[in-house]
Image (tube, rainbow, N blue to C red):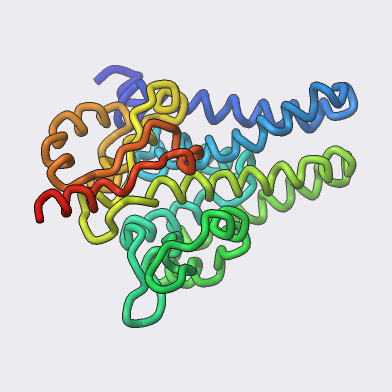
Amino acid sequence: MSSRRAFFAYTPWDLVPTLMGLGHLVFVAALFFGFHAMPWVLWLPLALVYSISISWSINSTSHNFIHNPFFRSPTLNRLYSIVLSLTDGFSQEFYHHVHLRHHVGNMDRIGPNGTTVDPLSIYRHGKDGKAESPWTYTFYSYFRDDIGEVYHRVKEKFPDKAKWIWREIYIVVAVYLACLVYDWRAFLALVPFYYFGHSLSSLNGYYEHYKGNPDDPIAWGVSTYNKLYNWLWLYNGYHAEHHYRPKVHWTRMVELRDSIREEQRAHGVHVMNHCHALGFLDRKPPQYTVVRQQAA
């Protein structure tokens, strides 16, 4: 076994997301510490990039790290989880368990108990069995996280992991408070861009499933095969494929899609031409409804 293979859990290609995550940390630090040195005409566009980078990280590097941790060493994986927590501004361990619950429910509809299994389901706060408005989902989702519920649920099965939810929260709060004391102007200037970044992540999540079929595993997600988006977002565009086989590594998503392409067409997997965040530009009807009409 090569030293690179011994270092990385799955493939040396995970060096790419590793460096992306570390680069993100450097970018956020540079934006904060360079606040007074940069003219507003430069700082404001970079702050907007910071917002986009939060959504990018949550849906690419952080997301892939949940399903396939990069390193063989548990210590390195824990340290990298802390790095992601600091750059994204919330506990990566918390995100890990919320996201796994997302895969248990897979954007399910409201059940007999009056709610959904998936805490991120676009149907949870909708009316008459329909998905809620993308506006409310985008801008309210940040305030809907229930840290206590997740902690107690995880604690029942994985008490050591549950502890890390709060440990990472404490680390993030401590570092952010230190930044606030060090330069309150820079800190407060970044706050609205931080919130907007998490809202963009919710927007991305909305269109990863809007027009998908919550009743058919192969069509749970909505895919886009835009090459630039997939290169930058670590093949998050292959979202129907990902929900169908969530443990498949990001480097093998094209191979997975090629192997199930005909089955996807038969079940009406919806494909858009835009990146997920621009899903509102997709005017095509849900593909699975078209397939049903043709079969009838």
Identify the residue at horizontal 32%, vertical 25% (top origin).
6
Left or right, 104 with reference to 41: left
Left or right, 36 with reference to 72: right
Where the N terminus falls, by quadrant? top left
Q: Which residue lies furthest to the top in this view?
A: 2
Left or right, 79 with reference to 86: left
Examine the rendering and report whether any part of residue 62 can be seen: no
Identify the residue at horizontal 51%, vertical 42% (top origin).
58
Identify the residue at horizontal 79%, vertical 50% (top origin).
177
Is residue 156 depicted above or below 204 in this figure? below
Q: Where is residue 235 in the image (x, y as percent from the top left)?
A: 37, 31
Identify the residue at horizontal 29%, vertical 59% (top origin).
214
Q: Position of residue 239 (x, y in %)?
A: 33, 41
Q: Position of residue 133 (x, y in %)?
A: 52, 59
Question: 94 or 6: nearer the eye?
Answer: 94
Examine the rendering and report whether any part of residue 268 can be seen: yes
Q: Quadrant of residue 124?
A: bottom left
Q: Where is residue 66 in the image (x, y as percent from the top left)?
A: 40, 45
Where the C terminus falls, by quadrant? bottom left
